Image (tube, grey):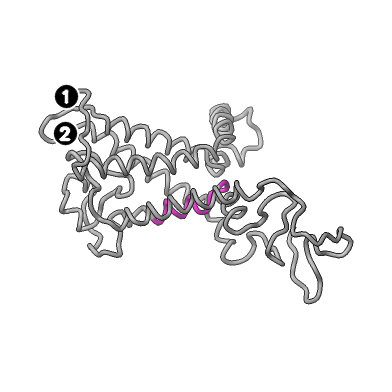
Amino acid sequence: MTTAARPGVAHGVAAPGRAQVDARTLRTDRWWLPPAATTIGLAIFLVYGGVRAFQQQYFFADERYLTPFYSPCVSLGCAAEPGAAHFGMFIPDHPLIPYAALTLPFLLLFRLTCYYYRKAYYRSVWMAPAACSVPEPHGTYHGETRFPLILQNSHRYFFYLTLVISLINTYDAVVAFRHPADGFVVGVGNLVLLTNVALLWLYTISCHSCRHAMGGRLKHFSQHPVRYRLWTTISALNTRHHLFAWITLGTLILTDLYVMLVARGTITDLRLIG
């Protein structure tokens, strides 16, 4: 429901006809813990990801491991690690331009407009609403009908772009099994990359936009048995979309951290085969 502000007219819990309670909230539990934890979790990822994206070093390890924060590495600066540039180098090298500038903005916008993340930061950062029985600090609410929140409706288009990026991440994980000098090898880093890309796929295909693409416009499921089966499978995954959203934030950081530590020589990648 959309409400518009009118001068002199109270809204929300202060509106006429509502119980007049002087306290901001009558809740005695620590209702602020979930939104605070969400804010901290999102902030940690944004700060870590931002620092690593612009660090422009320690992104390629053992001549085959490319961190997802730098994939695809298409900057001219990738010449320092030519094995990381699987798709060529054509973006100018500049301290303010990430090496993966071709994909990082779309990945960020895909997550920023994700239905779960909207709920997460609306309730935590924007405090709309903060929690049940806790008044909002805002006097008006227009939903996603005005700028800038109306741009949230572009989520489905970022989903299609993310599918392409997921294929690139998968390619990175597959080619990492081949070492330039030793041929086919399997190391702990390979397992890290594979686990990360598998979870990224689960997050991507469990997206609401993917579910809609599979069966959202169908009028008769009986006439489309294949799409119906895909729709039911994705619907089951969709119930855990919030879980995949948080897990992949963690695996992205851990994967990048592993590659960085190997690239710096802090740890050694354990070879399992080869």
Q: Position of residue 49 (x, y in %)?
A: 37, 52
Q: What's the residue type where badge 1 is placed? A: Gly
| Circle 1 residues within 10 Å: few <14, some 14–19, many ≥20 | few
Write the residue at 73% across / 58% down: 135
Picture layout, residue 266 above or below residue 225: below
User: To which residue does mark 2 refer?
Assistant: 179
59 in magenta: no
Q: Are marks 1 and 2 in contact (CB under 8 Å)?
A: yes
Judging depth in this view, the residue of 68 and 188 nearest the camera is: 188
**Quadrant housing the N terminus:** bottom right
User: To which residue does mark 1 refer?
Assistant: 274
| Circle 2 residues within 10 Å: few <14, some 14–19, many ≥20 | some
- Specify whether 222 is left or right of 68: right
Q: CA distance from mark 1 to mark 2?
A: 9 Å
Tell which circle, 1 or 2, labels the residue nearer the N-terminal end: 2
Q: Position of residue 12 (x, y in %)?
A: 78, 61
- Specify whether 48 is left or right of 175: right
- Specify whether 79 is left or right of 167: left
Q: Tell me the quarter of the picture where residue 145 sits.
A: bottom right
Using the image, tell me which numbered label, if any, was put on residue 93. Answer: none
Write the residue at 32% across / 33% down: 192
**Magenta residues (range):** 105-116
Write the residue at 16% across / 54% down: 79
Q: Position of residue 65 (x, y in %)?
A: 24, 39
Write the residue at 59% across / 50% down: 35
